Amino acid sequence: MQTNSEPFTSLFSGFSIAERQQIEQALACVALIPDDPHYHRPKGVEVAAILTGFNVDLETILAAILSDPRLEKMTSPPDIKKQFGDTVATLVKDVMWLNKLTVYSPEMANKPHQAETLRRMLLSMTHDVRAVLVKLAYRIQFLRHLSQVSYEERHFIAQETLDIYAPIANRLGIHQFKWELEDMAFRYLEPATYRQIAKSLATNRIHRENCVNNFIHLLQSTLAEEGISCKCYGRPKHIYSIWKKMQRKQLPIDELYDLLAVRVIVDNLAHCYTALGIVHNLWQTIPKEFDDYIANPKENGYQSLHTVILDPEGNRIEVQIRTQDMHDYAELGVAAHWSYKEGGKQTAAMEKSVATLRKLLEEKHNVDNLSDNFRNELFSDRVYVLTPAGKLIDLVKGATPLDFAYAIHTEVGHRCRGAKVNGRIVPLTYILKSGEQIEILTAKDGAPNRNWIDPNLGYLKSHRAISRVKSWFGNQQQAEKIAIGKTILDKECHRLGIKNPNLTDALSHFKQPDTDALLETIGKGLITNRQLAAFLKVPELEDTLTNAKLKKSTAKSVISVAGIDNVQTSLAHCCEPVLGDDIIGYISHHHGITVHRKDCKNITHLSAEKQAQLIGVSWGAEKTTHAVPIIVQAYNAQNLLNDVSHILAQSKIHIFSAAMHSNSDLSGELNMTIQIENTHQLSQVLDKIAQLPNIIEARRQV
């Protein structure tokens, strides 16, 4: 390579004498690289030459020259940090990393999510966005010489360019890079189609340019007569975008409306519609091709007037009219061109990040502050890591190897016992960084640890992983309760001499969806042994209605039967009637009269024959008390028993029994049996309990 800089004089354009000396110094470094006629990869100097047309700063030019891959292979590579400073050294390091990255696979072409994750990872891992610009220039240079490599490599590089690098260029607003990347990649992927479209465009190129120029000249002069200043320029269509539109509209090239396109930028909203009226007066329009995105903006906020006209020669020209603010918003705001061209909704954080990237590219001064913004804002809520097979995983910022394991598969998370990051063993609380490769070490049969869901220990960050662990423990608790419930049921059946209990009827009676739910409810104690025993004896209806274990009323004269006091009565346990309830009596052949609530299922389901044994009853005048079971459910069960007991004590209500059931998430359920006089007193105390903090529900147990 030549040691002088004459072949690269464009590199010095716009720089001071001192800056040119640094470029000379960088060129001297790469001049020491031995010539290799078989080396077909991009060279740093060639890449720097591409960037000179983009008004880049000195650091970017130096980084492009010094990130030449051949420098690393030299016996004594230059000390870039010492010679050119920290900023250039960091830029070179980023570009080198981007050039070596081998995450992409052709399968990503059919997996848009994976391609998007890779694009985000490339941007999030770059310390300085100017490194991305240099990388794009490297890809441009590589594509220009791609014919010198094998067919397989050409195809791979071209597809990677379309999937990863052209969209990044588009997001950064570097449209010239985007167009060149797309067109050159398309040339290698579809050479026959590329040549066909190129030939068609070349045939009419001068004609098309004349049509656009004539249109712009007439429109600008007419608008000037109306006192409207404007910027008009043709929008050339590139081969790849033409092909995409042919595919999307299923039309041949000669039927596409917008091969000729002009953009008109005016000062204000009123001038937009004035310009539109002038365009429609001067040229014939195609009505079906008019869209008013100002009055009816696109979902992403994009605004512009679109129309298609026919010039005197019958050429179709697409015209876009907008204000400068609308244009800036379309380029930098939430309606940025890439948002709706690439498809898919973007987050506000990403839109802000992309705007920061573009500003950084446009600014040659005050770069440090913008670069800091870039590092602080860009995808600050995400981290992108790799599986051993090279698959990209998108995780929340602060995620650990355990989060990664659960992102792969729930069972991998449950069985996780260790992890390697870039081949090194790390603790499960290690905070992952973008670009790291993670390998999970699993046990053959394993289960999660309760410490994993302790927020103070730092094992898990993602809500999804935390919910998977909680669900596992919930299922284990459920299985335990089901086993307990089955044991209780078996014991009751054995005690009562019942071999085959009717569980189908039990599901209906206890309002449970399936057998597991029934057994779990029994295991939790929500269905008591007495309730279970009462149901198991249902086949003997008389026994159910007049169970010997039913509580006797605490006073002889509580119930009047057909207006007569002092009749032997007992209160049915199945519905637990309380003073104030509507009641009815059932005449038993052996146990006198059993008093039920009128809405008791054992009463409403009586056969016509048994209904003859019903008799009217009413509450007597003497004061009495009744044992009534209640249930209190709370989001946070801490101090629940103490708080409820305090309310009952204030209300002078005696507690017969109390049982607390707490869950791992601090929620719980309190089952109590209390002594009350009537339904009014019960309603009052339940209302007071319901007003306590964290209460979900306070009700009488049915």
Image: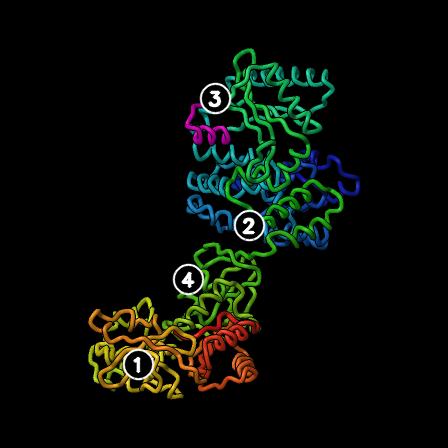
Looking at the rendering, in which quadrant would you find the C terminus? bottom left
Which span is picked out in magenta?
240-253
Q: Nearer the viewer, residue 15 or 680?
A: 680
Residue 434 point in image, percent of width and height: 56, 57
Residue pointed to by mark 1: 594
Residue pointed to by mark 3: 199
Going 65% across and 17% down the picture, which residue do you hit?
219
| Sequence-wise first label, 1 or 2 | 2
Looking at the rendering, in which quadrant would you find the N terminus? top right
For the stretch drawn in magenta, what is the main secondary structure?
helix
Q: Is residue 245 magenta?
A: yes
User: How dense is the environment of label 2, judged by Cα within 10 Å: few (below 14), some, or many (20 and up)?
Assistant: many
SS state under label 1: strand
* Location of residue 446 by image quarter: bottom left
Q: CA distance from mark 4 to mark 2?
A: 23 Å
Q: Amino acid at mark 1?
A: Thr
